[in-house]
Amino acid sequence: MSLWLEILISALLLLGSGFVLIGSLGLYRLPDFFTRLHGPTKATTLGVGAMVVGSLIFFSAGEKGLSLHELLISLFLFISAPVSAYMLAKAAVLQELPLEPKTRGKPWEQ
Amino acid sequence: MLAYVIPLCLTLLGLALLLATARLVKGPSLPDRALALDTLYINAITLIILYGIWKGSELFFEVALLIAVLGFVSTVAVAKYMLRGDIIE
Amino acid sequence: MSRLLPHPAQSLLLLLTWLLLVDSIAFGQWLLGGVLAVIIPLACNRLLIEHPHGWKPLKMARFLGMVVVDILIANFQVARLTLGPVKKLRPAFIEVPIDLDNELAISVLVSVVSLTPGSLAADLSLDRRTLLVHGLDVPDPQAMIDELKLRYEAPLKEIFPCSPM
C-alpha cells in the first residue's frame, strides 16, 4: 500500500473517531435532553461515515479489489438516525422533561 | 503508520464509550438513558469497523450491519414504549 | 408492467442494496437480486405509501448532494459548539410552518432538518402544517426559520410537485 493512501486512511480514521468522541462528549456534558440529542445524531453519524469511507479505501486497496458494501452501514445510519432522534424527541416532549432555563420558546401542549 | 493510528483511534473510541456509559448510569430520565444506549450502539459499530481494519478481515462488516439494524429497531421500540406505553398495538 | 413493478424506484433500490450486500456483480447475483426486487414490493404492496407522481430524480440527486456538503461543513460548527463553553449556547424551540402536502416530502424534510447540525426536528403537529424544531445555538429564530424554508423546503417543493392528497 502506498504511503499516500495510508495517510489518507489514517486521516479518515482519526476524523471518524474524533467526531464519535465529540458526539459522546456532547452527550455527556450538555445541559438538557434536547441539547444532548444534537451530539449523537449528527457528529456520530458523520463519524461513522468517515470511518466507513476509510475502511472502504483500505479494503479496496487490498488484493480483492473494489468493495463498496461498507457503504450500506453508512446509508442505513443516515436514514435511521433522524427517525430514532425524532421518536426520542417526541417521547421527551410527551414526558415534559426539564429544559435548560435559557431556552426560548417551548414545545406545544400535546 | 496505520499500526500507530489504529490504537490511537481505539483509545478515542474507548473514551467515547466511557462517556456514553457515564450518561447511561447518570440518567436522569428515561429518554436520556435510551439516547445513551443509542449512542453506545453507534459507537460499537465504529469500534467493530476499526477492529475489522486492524485484523484485515471483511467478516466484521456483517456484524456491524447487524448491530446497526438491531440497534435502530430497539431504539424505536423503546421510544414507542415511552410514547404509548405499548410497543405493538 | 405496472402490475409486476408497482414501485419501480423501490425495486431498483432493492436490487442495488442486494448487489452491495453480497458485494459481487456476478450474473447469478443480478438474477437473484432482480427476483427479490420484484417479489418484495409485491409482497408488501399494502404497506408502502403511495408514491408521488412526477417527482424529479435528477433534482433529488442534486439536492442530496447539497445536503451532504451541508452536513460536512456544519458538523465542524457543531463540534466547536460542543467543545466550547456550555454557558454561551443559546438553545431555542422554533415553530416552522411547512406547506408540503406529500408524506414522502415531509419525511425527507424532517430527516434533512435533523441531519443538518444545529437543528433537530422534535415534533410534527397533527395537521402536518407546523414542525417543531430545536436549535442548539440560535441567535435569531426568524432568520433560522427563513433559512430552513429557503434552503430545504423550496427545493423539496420543486422535486415533489403538488400532488393530490
Image (spheres, rainbow, N blue to C red):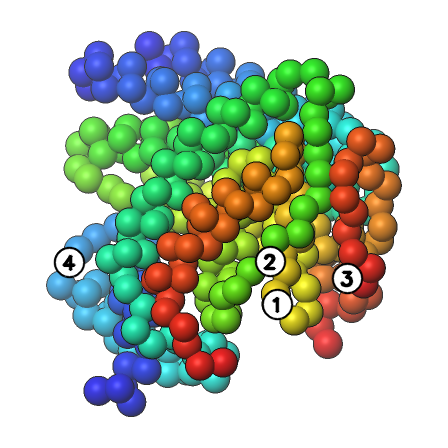
Q: Give the Cα separation between the discs numbered 2 and 4.
A: 49 Å
Indicate which disc, 2 or 1, sits on the residue closer to the N terminus.
Answer: 2
- Mark 4 vs mark 1: tell me if same chain: yes
> Foreground: B38 or C69?
C69
Q: Which amino acid does label 1 sit on?
A: Arg
Q: Give the Cα separation between the discs numbered 2 and 1.
A: 9 Å
Residue A15, x across and y down, in percent? 44, 22
Q: Residues within 10 Å of mark 2 (few under 14, many from 20)?
A: some
Discs 4/1, front? 1
Residue on which disc 3 sits:
B83
- Mark 2 vs mark 1: tell me if same chain: yes
> Foreground: C25 or A35?
A35
Residue on which disc 4 sits:
C26
* Point 52% across, 25% down: residue: C77
Asked if the residue under mark 1 is in contact with the one under mark 2, i.e. CB atoms within 8 Å, the reply is no
Discs 3/2, front? 2
Indicate which disc, 2 or 4, sits on the residue closer to the N terminus.
Answer: 4
Q: Give the Cα separation between the discs numbered 4 and 3.
A: 46 Å
Asked if the residue under mark 3 is in contact with the one under mark 1, i.e. CB atoms within 8 Å, the reply is no
Q: Is mark 3 on a helix, strand or loop?
A: helix
Residue on which disc 2 sits:
C97
- Mark 1 vs mark 3: tell me if same chain: no
Residue on which disc 1 sits:
C128
Discs 1/3, front? 1
The correct choice, above or below, for C65 with respect to A12 in the image is: below
* Point 43% across, 19% down: residue: A14
Discs 2/4, front? 2
Q: Give the Cα separation between the discs numbered 1 and 3.
A: 19 Å
Residue C141 figure quarter? top right
The correct choice, above or below, for C54 with respect to A5 in the image is: below
Q: Give the Cα separation between the discs numbered 4 and 1.
A: 45 Å
